[in-house]
Image (tube, rainbow, N blue to C red):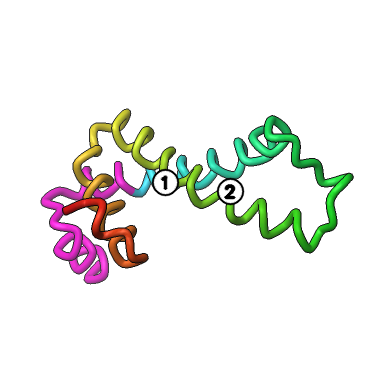
Amino acid sequence: MKWLNNLKAKWNIQSNFQLVIIFIVFGITGTLSVEVRDPILDFIGLKKEVMNPWIFIPLKLLLIYPVYQILILIIGTIFGQFKFFWEFEKKMLSKMGFSRFFN
């Protein structure tokens, strides 16, 4: 259980309950982002049957990333953890070079 305590310290979390809620949000968001990806691709008009797999598969992977980022904030807010996930997003996006948008 040392890894849980290390994780709580790293994320500045005080309770095990909050940690469980955060894990639940990560799980729901991951599953939901995969589930909504194909309907979004259909809505955009990108069909697996008419595209080369070498183009279609990377597009699916690229699409899932922004969908996940939006969903994690929505699901996190529903579970009362917006502040944690907003800080998490800012840290992740700043590591990707988007820090100028959050200063």
Going by the picture, which residue comes out furthest to the right? 49
Look at the picture and state if 23 lies above or below 44: below
Q: Which residues are magenta?
A: 1-22
Q: Is residue 52 left or right of residue 43?
A: right
Given the image, on which type of amino acid does mark 2 rest? Leu
Give coordinates of residue 4: x percent, y percent. 25, 63
Q: Which residue is mark 1?
A: 69
Q: Which residue is mark 2?
A: 63
Q: Residue at x 82, y 46 (%)?
A: 48
Q: Residue at x 42, y 46 (%)?
A: 69
Give coordinates of residue 1: x percent, y percent. 25, 67
Which element is circle 2 on? helix
Given the image, on which type of amino acid does mark 1 rest? Gln
Give coordinates of residue 62: x percent, y percent. 58, 55
Query: In the figure, residue 42 lies in which quadrant?
Result: top right
Going by the picture, which residue comes out furthest to the front? 100
Give coordinates of residue 95: x percent, y percent. 31, 67
Which element is circle 1 on? helix
Q: Residue at x 42, y 40 (%)?
A: 70
Q: Residue at x 20, y 68 (%)?
A: 6
Q: Is residue 81 magenta?
A: no
10 Å neighbourhood of mark 1: few (<14), some, or many (≥20)? some
Query: In the figure, residue 11 lies in which quadrant?
Result: bottom left
Look at the picture and state if 84 lies above or below 62: above
On residue 30, which mark appears?
none
